[in-house]
């Protein structure tokens, strides 16, 4: 269950989820769908691992959830980002960006492999 | 940072079924994915397959989620329950804080109730509930001949062979020996016992060792174990005491051990007489020095494992039959479980006290319930509105209960303080007859008891009002409100019933106190038959080694008497074999010219006395003469009897000149030369037994009680008395020094305690009942203001209004007194053992108490009645 995906990936999944919820509240499938659409289906997460990740975020107080009706009038569980979640997203996003830049600068060092 | 606890959010989605929710969520995901694939043009089968492939294993995910959600739900529920409780408590505290008068009243009532109960419980706990300190006490039995008669040494040997019943059987007796040597001679309480007795009692010496079985045998070395107290007092805590020789009863003993203080260091006795031993010596008996007709041994047995005392009793009976054939004497043995043996006759007193204190607690609870009912009535509107606005009934009940439990706990804490003071007071009063009173403390167990008691009390007095209040129907309450009355007839009936119960309980308690008070009065007024004023008593025991001859003993006591008589401040001096009110020797005797079948022969108390004895105690001479200088060794032996003796054995004729056989190391018959007044010998409440006195000069004895009537404070004579004794024999201890007034007081101590406690309890209950009645009547007046106002407006006079109110109170009082009288008639039997000179249905007590209660109750209802009669009708009617 994504346990062997490592902390980095876990953290990344959490980051993606929070980002997906930053604009509006969504149900689980909506989060997957949003990431798929934004990345042009490049980032494919194992969809099953989304839900444990959501629970963990919820346990940490970063997201909130409620039962509601979906766009096709089905009963669905909606997730929303909390104030804590937003702060966490902000901090994590800048961490991640710094890290990505660092990796990029390594890769771009002479002789560049890119 | 978070505006509300996080678990609150779960409220919104958690339904009753976690598993179904998880399934719904995952199914929704898979179906949405499938739909999207269908829209992209995949075949239904492919769409499903692709959706699953993207998802992973739905079963595993579902399992994980279910486990997670179930865990969280549980945690949430716990937290919520906790938070509700905290909220209830906060709410309760706030409400109580807002009405300090009510809170203070309730806490005070509860503190008294719980405090009294806890104090008495701690006494009963120490006496009855705490197991005996010996190891495996349930297997220990006291072994006696039928009727708790001690056994002889050969009997001990017989019973020791009954190994089917006894795993171990030991013998012991308590005696006194003079300790001489350095310093003042001192009379010691000595236990003489077989080696297994200290082992059965679980005694562990502080230093040294216990006796060995070999030391039970006569001829073995004389060894002694000292109590720690004696060791410190007498030997300065000498660290090299072991192996030292001390002189006890003129004989040398080698010290082998020191026994630490504590309950284990008290040999089993009826605990009323329990006293720590000063020294322990080994048995060293043989059938030769202790033949079968010498019955003086106490026996302590440990039953075989798994053998109940009742079974053991049965088995010993069959063993006894076998013995009877072998030995030829009756062997009716009685096995008494040690617990019963030790508590003895203190049980009725303790049970009566427990009953009394339970009543006080009940009254306190009733009172508080009444206060809460009144309060609930006031709050009915509030509660009804809250119920109408959707508060769950359970929650409302819980809230009200939380309030009463809070009250009970605060009351309990205050009660523990009361109990603390109470126990200290009891110990100060300290009668010897309450077993282990000195060990009574307020410890963790007692605190636990108080806690449980408070909680039970809280539930008891809180539940009923809470249930009642929560059942309130809004419509009804509002209607009532409009009518200006706040309680239905059912409520009034309930409060009335509670008051009746309070008055009844209080009545029963007052009867108890009244009976005890009148008994004590009667006892104090009893004609003891002697004058105890300014008489000092002490005990002298001549060592056999230095005074082996009867004439030496007689000469010693005679000189002692003369020297004491010559002391300044001494009025008269007398000697006797045992002092009044403490029992003494008794036995059968013969009357010349009469034959009695065996077992039917006359029986009397027997004393030897010096001529001065009758003077010192001012025992009146009824006929003939008392002993004088004529009655010496060699002269014809004479006896003096008491009035009861003369009337019982020589009715209608003069006892003077009759001859009887004293049968106490005497031969032939002795002439009755005088008849004296009756003296209460056993106890104040027991009538004088028939009594025979024989002159000390004609009946040598190695011991005597020296009685001295002084002109001033009896104790002021003691130093010179000690000097006189030391001047005659520097190794003779002056023991058991006390005044006869102290002897009398000691005999009354437990009655005094019982009476004091019943007195305190009953006054407490009277005050509580009066308060309760006052509250109920006042409340009634408030409720009926309008009616009273109308009546007054229509011309009712002051007396009529007062009568209206008083009638209500009177009805409750009458009902309470009747119920209480019936209860007291029935409960009186528990006091039978403590009542003296009157019946437990003593009409004067019952009448007096009924009157007292009626007057108190009337006073309690008079104040509200007066208030009612001074209502201003105009303002009352306007205010409605």
Image (tube, coloured by chain):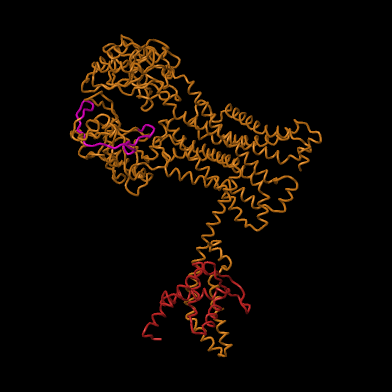
Chain colours: A red, B orange
**Identity of the residue furthest to the right in this view:** B794
Residue A46 point in image, percent of width and height: 48, 80
* Of the pair A47 and B488, the residue shown nearer to us: A47
Residue B644 point in image, percent of width and height: 43, 19
* Of the pair B699 and B609, the residue shown nearer to us: B609
Above or below, comparing residue B459 to residue B841 in the picture: below
Q: Is residue B170 visible?
A: yes
Above or below, comparing residue B78 to residue B497 in the picture: below
Q: Is residue B366 left or right of residue B337?
A: right
Above or below, comparing residue B194 to residue B377 in the picture: above
Residue under the image location 56 percent in, 90 percent down: B43
| Residue B31, picture quadrant | bottom right
Q: Is residue B674 left or right of residue B635?
A: right
Q: How many marks?
A: 0
Q: Quadrant of the C terminus of chain B?
A: top right
Q: Is residue B286 visible?
A: no
Residue B478 point in image, percent of width and height: 72, 51
* Of the pair A98 and B855, the residue shown nearer to us: A98
Residue under the image location 44 percent in, 28 percent down: B749
| Residue B817, picture quadrant | top right
* Of the pair B618 and B754, the residue shown nearer to us: B754
Q: Is residue B517 magenta?
A: no
Above or below, comparing residue B129 to residue B579 in the picture: below
Q: Which residues are magenta?
A: B246-274
**Identity of the residue furthest to the top in this view:** B630
Residue B662 point in image, percent of width and height: 33, 19
Q: Is residue B250 magenta?
A: yes
């Amino acid at each position: 269950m994504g346990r062997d995906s490592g902390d980095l990936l876990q953290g990344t999944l959490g980051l993606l989820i929070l980002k997906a919820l930053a604009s509006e509240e969504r149900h689980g499938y909506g989060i997957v769908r949003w990431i798929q659409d934004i990345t042009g289906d490049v980032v494919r997460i194992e969809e099953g691992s989304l839900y444990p990740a959501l629970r963990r975020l919820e346990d940490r107080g970063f997201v909130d959830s409620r039962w509601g009706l979906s766009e096709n009038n089905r009963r669905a569980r909606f997730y929303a980002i909390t104030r804590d979640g937003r702060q966490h997203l902000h901090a994590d996003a800048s961490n991640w960006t710094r890290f990505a830049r660092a990796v990029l600068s390594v890769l771009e060092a002479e002789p560049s492999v890119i | 940072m978070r505006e509300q606890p996080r678990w609150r959010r779960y409220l919104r989605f958690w339904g009753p079924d976690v598993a179904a929710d998880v399934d719904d969520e995952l199914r929704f995901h898979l179906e949405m994915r499938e739909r999207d694939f269908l829209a992209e043009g995949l075949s239904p089968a492919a769409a499903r397959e692709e959706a699953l492939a993207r998802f992973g294993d739905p079963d595993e995910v579902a399992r994980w989620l279910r486990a997670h959600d179930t865990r969280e739900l549980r945690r949430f529920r716990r937290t919520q329950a906790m938070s509700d409780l905290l909220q209830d408590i906060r709410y309760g505290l706030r409400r109580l804080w807002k009405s300090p008068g009510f809170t203070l009243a309730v806490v005070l009532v509860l503190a008294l109730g719980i405090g009294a109960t806890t104090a008495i419980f701690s006494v009963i706990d120490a006496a009855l509930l705490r197991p005996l300190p010996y190891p495996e006490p349930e297997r220990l039995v006291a072994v006696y001949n039928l009727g708790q008669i001690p056994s002889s040494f050969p009997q001990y040997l017989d019973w020791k062979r009954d190994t089917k019943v006894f795993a171990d059987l030991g013998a012991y007796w308590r005696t006194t020996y003079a300790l001489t040597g350095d310093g003042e001679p001192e009379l010691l309480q000595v236990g003489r016992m077989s080696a297994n007795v200290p082992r059965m009692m679980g005694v562990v010496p502080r230093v040294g060792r216990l006796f060995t079985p070999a030391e039970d045998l006569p001829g073995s070395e004389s060894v002694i174990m000292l109590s720690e107290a004696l060791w410190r007092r007498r030997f300065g805590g000498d660290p090299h005491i072991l192996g030292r020789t001390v002189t006890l009863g003129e004989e040398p003993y080698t010290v082998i051990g020191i026994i630490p203080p504590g309950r284990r260091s008290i040999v089993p006795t009826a605990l009323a007489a329990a006293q720590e031993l000063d020294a322990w010596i080994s048995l060293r008996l043989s059938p030769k020095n202790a033949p079968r007709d010498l019955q003086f041994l106490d026996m302590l047995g440990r039953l075989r494992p798994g053998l109940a005392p009742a079974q053991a009793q049965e088995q010993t009976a069959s063993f006894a039959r076998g013995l009877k054939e072998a030995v030829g004497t009756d062997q009716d043995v009685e096995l008494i479980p040690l617990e019963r043996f030790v508590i003895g006759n203190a049980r009725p007193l303790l049970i009566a006290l427990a009953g009394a204190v339970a009543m006080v607690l009940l009254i306190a609870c009733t009172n508080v319930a009444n206060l809460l009912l009144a309060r609930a009535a006031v709050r009915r509107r509030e509660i009804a509105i809250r119920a109408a606005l959707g508060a769950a009934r359970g929650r409302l009940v819980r809230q009200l209960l939380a309030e009463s439990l809070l009250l009970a706990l605060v009351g309990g804490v205050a009660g523990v303080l009361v109990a603390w003071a109470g126990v200290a007071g009891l110990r100060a009063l300290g009668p010897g007859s309450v077993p282990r009173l000195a060990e009574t403390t307020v410890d963790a167990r007692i605190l636990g008891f108080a806690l449980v008691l408070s909680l039970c009390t809280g539930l008891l007095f809180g539940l009923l009002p809470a249930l009642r209040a929560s059942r309130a129907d809004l419509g009804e309450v509002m209607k009532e409100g409009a009518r200006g009355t706040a309680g239905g007839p059912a409520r009034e009936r309930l409060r009335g019933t509670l008051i009746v119960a309070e008055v009844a309980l209080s009545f029963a308690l007052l009867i108890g106190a009244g009976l005890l008070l009148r008994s004590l009065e009667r006892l104090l007024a009893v004609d003891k038959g002697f004058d105890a004023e300014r008489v000092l008593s002490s005990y002298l025991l001549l060592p056999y080694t230095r005074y082996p001859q009867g004439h030496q003993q007689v000469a010693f006591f005679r000189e002692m008497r003369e020297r004491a008589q010559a002391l300044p401040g001494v009025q008269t001096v007398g000697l006797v074999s045992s002092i009044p009110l403490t029992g003494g020797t008794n036995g059968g005797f013969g009357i010349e010219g009469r034959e009695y079948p065996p077992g039917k022969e006359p029986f009397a108390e027997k004393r030897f006395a010096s001529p001065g004895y009758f003077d010192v105690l001012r025992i009146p001479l009824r006929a003939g003469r008392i002993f004088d200088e004529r009655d010496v060794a060699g002269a014809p032996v004479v006896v003096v009897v008491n009035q009861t003796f003369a009337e019982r054995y020589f009715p209608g004729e003069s006892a003077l000149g009759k001859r009887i056989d004293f049968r106490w190391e005497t031969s032939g018959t002795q002439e009755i030369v005088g008849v004296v007044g009756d003296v209460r010998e056993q106890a104040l409440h027991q009538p004088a037994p028939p009594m025979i006195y024989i002159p000390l000069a004609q009946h040598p004895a190695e011991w005597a009680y020296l009685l001295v009537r002084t002109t001033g404070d009896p104790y002021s004579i003691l130093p010179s008395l000690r000097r006189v004794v030391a001047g005659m024999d520097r190794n003779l201890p002056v023991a058991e020094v006390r005044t006869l007034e102290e002897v009398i007081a000691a005999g009354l101590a437990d009655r005094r305690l019982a009476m004091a406690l019943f007195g305190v309890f009953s006054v407490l209950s009277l005050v509580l009942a009066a308060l309760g009645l006052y509250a109920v009547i006042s409340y009634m007046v408030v409720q009926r203001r309008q009616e009273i106002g109308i009546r007054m407006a229509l011309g009712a006079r002051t007396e009529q209004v007062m009568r209206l109110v008083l009638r209500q109170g009177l009805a409750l009082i009458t009902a309470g007194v009747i119920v209480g009288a019936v209860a007291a008639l029935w409960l009186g039997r528990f006091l039978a053992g403590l009542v003296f000179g009157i019946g437990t249905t003593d009409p004067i007590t019952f009448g007096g108490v009924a009157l007292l209660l009626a007057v108190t109750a009337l006073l309690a209802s008079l104040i509200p009645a007066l208030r009612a009669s001074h209502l201003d009708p105009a303002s009352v009617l306007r205010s409605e």
